[in-house]
Amino acid sequence: MNYTELVAAIKAYCDNTETTFVNNIPTFVKQAEDRIYRSVNLPVSRKIVDGNLSTSTKLLTFPSDLLAPLSFAVTNSASDQVFLINKDYNFMSQAYPDDSVKGFPKHYAIYDSTNFVLGPSPSATSAYRLSYFYKPASIVTASTTWLGTNADSALLYGALIEAYTFMKGETDMLQLYIARYSESVQRLQNYAKGVENSDA
């Protein structure tokens, strides 16, 4: 299902072509995409980025499209990748209170809206590899996407939930859309787990 087909389906299901409603369809669709990507860790929403840590710099800017980190590996002096442990910021504050203490990083945490904090601060420049979940381009702007092609039911019913809420529609119909959405997302979760299990 491409974006044009999705818009037509939303209008037909809701039996609504009123201008304000139609103008808000892109918002309904983007909200549905956000809900799906935050509910299911799909392989299509994974990215890898490589970079270098700076000596004595405990903060590292993460990619602007990051939703959640998956893994963070740093290359040590023996050229081995060492995976850091993801911790809560409170742990980092207690475990590494002194910024002057340097070493090979063991842990990382989300520090704020744009940075990770490493612990301890790197004592040397090292290569790193970050694997993370991100939100792919919206079908609103891309016209066709993985969700539209492979998870059209979840996308449609997610958008219908938003659209029907906007319309202040009947509770029974809204509950039906929620149930259909939940079924579709469950199938997506099974797909994601199946791919991970087969890869393992």
Image (cartoon, rainbow, N blue to C red):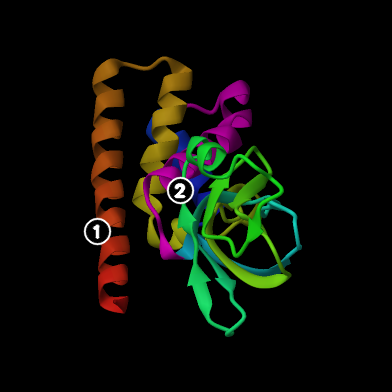
Q: Earlier in the sequence, mark 2 or mark 1?
A: 2
Quadrant of the drawing holding the C terminus:
bottom left
Relative height, residue 104 to residue 141 (above, below): below
Disc 2 from disc 1: Cα separation: 14 Å
Position of residue 179 in the picture relative to residue 153 (left or right): left
Q: Which residue does the image show at 44% across and 39% down from the upper left?
A: 35
Front-most of 72 and 33?
72
Residue topped by disc 1: 190
Front-most of 108 and 154?
108
Q: Position of residue 71 (x, y in %)?
A: 48, 62
Give the quarter of the image for residue 137.
bottom right
Answer yes or no: is residue 1 visible: no
Relative height, residue 176 to residue 7 (above, below): above
Residue topped by disc 2: 37
Kind of residue at badge 1: Asn
Kind of residue at badge 2: Tyr
Position of residue 53 in the picture relative to residue 173 (left or right): right
Please count the marks in the image.
2
Relative height, residue 177 to residue 58 (above, below): above
Q: Which residue does the image show at 44% across and 44% down from the upper left?
A: 38
**What secondary structure characterizes most of the magenta part?**
helix
Asked if residue 30 is among those painted magenta in the image, a careful observer would answer yes
Asked if residue 20 is among those painted magenta in the image, a careful observer would answer yes
**Mark 2 neighbour density, 10 Å: few (under 14) some (14–19) many (20 or more):** some
Q: Which residue does the image show at 38% across and 35% down from the upper left?
A: 13
Answer yes or no: is residue 95 visible: yes
Which residues fall within the magenta stretch?
Answer: 15-43
Q: Position of residue 86 (x, y in %)?
A: 47, 52
Position of residue 82 in the picture relative to residue 14 (left or right): right
Relative height, residue 119 to residue 164 (above, below): below
